[in-house]
Image (cartoon, rainbow, N blue to C red):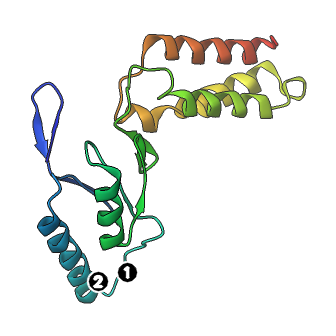
C-alpha cells in the first residue's frame, strides 16, 4: 500500500482497462501469492499477461532481491520514475522535467505547421483546438506549474504572431 496526498489515502492498486499497477511491501510469500493470482486470472479469463510490458520497480530493495523478484514474476526491472498509462509515477508534478513531454509535444506540433501557408484565423483555430488540448491528459493527474503554463502561452503566441 502507498499513502497518497495530503490526506494520506492508502492505495493498494490502480487499474484502468487492462492496465494494473500493484503496490505492496515486498515479502517473498506475497510475490508467490501474486504470481498465483495472476496465473488464476489468466486461466479463468482466457486473457494473457503481457510479460514484455510487465515491470517490477523497487523503492528501498537491494539489487539482488529485486533481480530475484523480477525473475520469479517473469518481469523486467525498471527504475523510477516509471510510466503508467503514459503518465510518470513518482514524478515531481511541480518540476519542469515532469512536464517536458507536454512542452516537447506543443513545440513539435507548432513547428510542424507551415505558418506562411496558414492565415491568422487558421493559426488561431489550430492553436485553440489542438495545442490547448495537449496538456489535458497530464492535467487529469497533475496541477500545472505556472512556469509551464507561461512557457506554453509563450510558444502559442510566438506561433500565432509568426515570431521565430
Residue located beneath label 2 in the image = 42
Q: Nearer the viewer, residue 54 or 130?
A: 54
Q: From the image, which quarter does the C terminus lie in?
A: top right
Above or below for 22 versus 123: below
Q: Quadrant of residue 65?
A: bottom left
Above or below for 150 versus 91: above
In the picture, measured across the screen, residue 138 lies left or right of residue 4, that is right
Element type where label 1 sits in the image: loop
Residue located beneath label 1 in the image = 48
Q: Nearer the viewer, residue 83 or 135?
A: 83
**N-term-proximal mark, 1 vs 2:** 2
Element type where label 2 sits in the image: helix
Residue 151 image point, x, y percent: 58, 14
In the picture, measured across the screen, residue 24 lies left or right of residue 51, that is left
For marks 1 and 2, give the CA distance.
Answer: 5 Å
Residue 25 image point, x, y percent: 15, 51
Task: Give the label on residue 5, or none.
Answer: none
Q: Nearer the viewer, residue 51 or 158?
A: 51
Residue 45 image point, x, y percent: 27, 84
Residue 48 image point, x, y percent: 37, 81
Q: Quadrant of residue 92?
A: top left
Mark 2 crowdedness (10 Å alpha carbons): few <14, some 14-19, many ≥20 = few
Q: Residue at x 47, y 29 (%)?
A: 98
* Label 1 close to label 2 by CB (< 8 Å): yes
Q: Residue at x 22, y 87 (%)?
A: 44
Q: Quadrant of residue 90?
A: top left
Amino acid at each position: 500500500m502507498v499513502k497518497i496526498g495530503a490526506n494520506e489515502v492508502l492505495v493498494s492498486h490502480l487499474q484502468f482497462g487492462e492496465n494494473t499497477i500493484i503496490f505492496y511491501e515486498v515479502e517473498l510469500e506475497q510475490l508467490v501469492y501474486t504470481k498465483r493470482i495472476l496465473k488464476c486470472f489468466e486461466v479463468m479469463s482466457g486473457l494473457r499477461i503481457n510479460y514484455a510490458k510487465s515491470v517490477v520497480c523497487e523503492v528501498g530493495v537491494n539489487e539482488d532481491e529485486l533481480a530475484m523478484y523480477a525473475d520469479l514474476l517473469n518481469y523486467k526491472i525498471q527504475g523510477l520514475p516509471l510510466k503508467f498509462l503514459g503518465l510518470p509515477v513518482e514524478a515531481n508534478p511541480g518540476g519542469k522535467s515532469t512536464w517536458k513531454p507536454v512542452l516537447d509535444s506543443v513545440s513539435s506540433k507548432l513547428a510542424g505547421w507551415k505558418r506562411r501557408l496558414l492565415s491568422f484565423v487558421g493559426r488561431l483555430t489550430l492553436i485553440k483546438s489542438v495545442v490547448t488540448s495537449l496538456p489535458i491528459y497530464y492535467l487529469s493527474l497533475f496541477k500545472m506549474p505556472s512556469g509551464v503554463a507561461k512557457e506554453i502561452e509563450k510558444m502559442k503566441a510566438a506561433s500565432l504572431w509568426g515570431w521565430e
